[in-house]
C-alpha cells in the first residue's frame, strides 16, 4: 500500500504515470464521462488547516469518481479534543477507504500514515504541498513547456519551494530558487533534492537574486509571503521581501513567452503585481482546475496500489 505525503517517495516514472492518468481523467470529465473508478468508496477529509481549493477539489473529485466525501473538521471530531492521532488513524481505517489531511505539521501526516491501513494523501503541510506540484506540472505539460524546462521560483523557501525542489529533482529539469536572506529552503530538503538530482540530471540553483533566477526561465512561479499561521509576521515579512514581487520588470528577464504560475490565493501588490496576474490568468486558473484532475488521478492510483 502507498501513501501520498511527498514527491520524495515517488519515482519519475510513477509521477509521469499519475500525470498521464490525470490527463485521461480530465478529458473524460470534459466529455461528461464520469467513470466510477472509486464506486462506493469513501474519502475522509481532515482539515486542521482550512482551504478553498483543497476542500472543493477533493470533495467534487471523489463524487465524480463515484464515491462519497466526509468533511471532518477538528472542531467536530475527537481529534480536536485531544484524541491521539494514531487512534484516529486506526478508527478511520476501519470505516473509510482513503483519507486526506491538510495540516500544519508534516510529522502529523507521517504519524497518521504509520498507524493507517488505508491510503493517506497530504492536502498540505508545513514542509510539502505535493498535490499542488502535480497540478502545476500537469499544466506545464499541457502548455508544452515541459521540454527543456527551466523554472524560477521567487519568494519564501516554504512548502511550495520544497515541493518544487522534489519535483525538479525527480523529473530532471532546471530549477532556480531565489529567496530573501533568512528565508532559505530547509537544508535537509535541499540536500535530499541535490542527491536525487545526481540521478535525474536536474540542475538546481539557490540564491538571493530574483532577477538572476528568472533570467531566461520558461516558467516563473511564486507563493504568498504570509502563509496561514504567520499573520503576526505580516509587516516584517512584507519588508523583508521587498524586491521579490513578480512584476512586469521581473518577468522581462524571463523568456518572451514565459508562463507564470501561482498556487493561490494570490495577494496582488505583494508577491505578484496585478498586471502580471491578469496577463497570465488563464494559465493560473487552468492550474487551479488541474488540482481537481490531479487529485482524482492520485486517488485512483493509490486505490490500484493497495
Image (cartoon, rainbow, N blue to C red):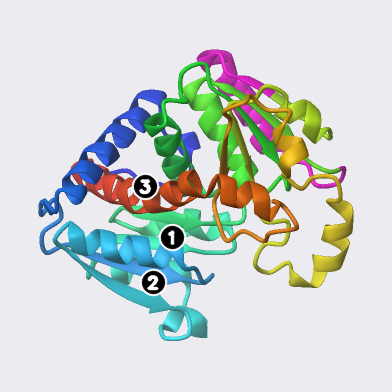
Residue mark closest to the camera, 3 vs 2: 3
Real-space Cα distance between discs 1 and 2? 8 Å
* Picture residue at 87% right of the left edge, 42% below the top: 181
Asked if the residues shown at circle 1 and circle 2 are in contact, with their CB atoms under 8 angstroms apart, the answer is yes
Report the side of 5 relative to 242 (left or right).
left
Report the span colored magenta: 181-204
Residue mark closest to the camera, 3 vs 1: 3
Image location (x, y in percent) of residue 221: 62, 41
* Picture residue at 38% right of the left edge, 76% below the top: 72
Asked if the residues shown at circle 3 and circle 2 are in contact, with their CB atoms under 8 angstroms apart, the answer is no
Residue 3 image label: 3
Real-space Cα distance between discs 3 and 2? 17 Å
Q: Is 203 within the magenta?
A: yes
Residue 219 image label: none
Image location (x, y in percent) of residue 258: 58, 30
Disc 2 crowd, CA 10 A, few/some/many (<14, 14-19, 20+): some
Disc 3 crowd, CA 10 A, few/some/many (<14, 14-19, 20+): many
Q: Quadrant of the C terminus?
A: top left
Pick whichever of labels 3 and 2 is earlier in the sequence: 3
Report the side of 79 relative to 267 (left or right).
left
Real-space Cα distance between discs 3 and 1? 10 Å
**Label 1's element?**
helix
Q: In which image quadrant can residue 104 be found?
A: bottom right
Asked if the residues shown at circle 3 and circle 1 are in contact, with their CB atoms under 8 angstroms apart, the answer is no
Disc 1 crowd, CA 10 A, few/some/many (<14, 14-19, 20+): many
Task: Give the answer, above or below, for where 92 lies relative to 271.
Answer: below
Task: Give the answer, above or below, for where 5 lies relative to 192.
Answer: below
**Label 2's element?**
helix
Report the side of 207 relative to 97 (left or right).
right
Residue identifier under label 2? 88
Residue 112 image label: 1
Amino acid at each position: 500500500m502507498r501513501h501520498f505525503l511527498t514527491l520524495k517517495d515517488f519515482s519519475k516514472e510513477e509521477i509521469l504515470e499519475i500525470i498521464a492518468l490525470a490527463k485521461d481523467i480530465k478529458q473524460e470529465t470534459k466529455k461528461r464521462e464520469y467513470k466510477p473508478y472509486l464506486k462506493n468508496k469513501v474519502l475522509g477529509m481532515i482539515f486542521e488547516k482550512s482551504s478553498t481549493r483543497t476542500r472543493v477539489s477533493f470533495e467534487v473529485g471523489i463524487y465524480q469518481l463515484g464515491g462519497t466525501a466526509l468533511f471532518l473538521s477538528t472542531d467536530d471530531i475527537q481529534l480536536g479534543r485531544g484524541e491521539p492521532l494514531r487512534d484516529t488513524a486506526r478508527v478511520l481505517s476501519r470505516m473509510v477507504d482513503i483519507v486526506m489531511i491538510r495540516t500544519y505539521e508534516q510529522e502529523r501526516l507521517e504519524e497518521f500514515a504509520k498507524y493507517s491501513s488505508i491510503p493517506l494523501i497530504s492536502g498540505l503541510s508545513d514542509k510539502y504541498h505535493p498535490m499542488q506540484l502535480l497540478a502545476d506540472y500537469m499544466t506545464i505539460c499541457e502548455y508544452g513547456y515541459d521540454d527543456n524546462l527551466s523554472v524560477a521560483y521567487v519568494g519564501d523557501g516554504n512548502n511550495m519551494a520544497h515541493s518544487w525542489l522534489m519535483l525538479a529533482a525527480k523529473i530532471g529539469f532546471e530549477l532556480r530558487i531565489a529567496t530573501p536572506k533568512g528565508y532559505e529552503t530547509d537544508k535537509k530538503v535541499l540536500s535530499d533534492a541535490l542527491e536525487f538530482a545526481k540521478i535525474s540530471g536536474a540542475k538546481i540553483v539557490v540564491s538571493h537574486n530574483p532577477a538572476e533566477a528568472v533570467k531566461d526561465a520558461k516558467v516563473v512561479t511564486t507563493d504568498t509571503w504570509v502563509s496561514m499561521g504567520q499573520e503576526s509576521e505580516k509587516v516584517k515579512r512584507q519588508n523583508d521581501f521587498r524586491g521579490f514581487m513578480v512584476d512586469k520588470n521581473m518577468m522581462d528577464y524571463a523568456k518572451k513567452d514565459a508562463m507564470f504560475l501561482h498556487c493561490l490565493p494570490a495577494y496582488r501588490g505583494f508577491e505578484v503585481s496585478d498586471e502580471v496576474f491578469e496577463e497570465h490568468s488563464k494559465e493560473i486558473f487552468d492550474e487551479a482546475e488541474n488540482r481537481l484532475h490531479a487529485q482524482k488521478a492520485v486517488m485512483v492510483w493509490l486505490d490500484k496500489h493497495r
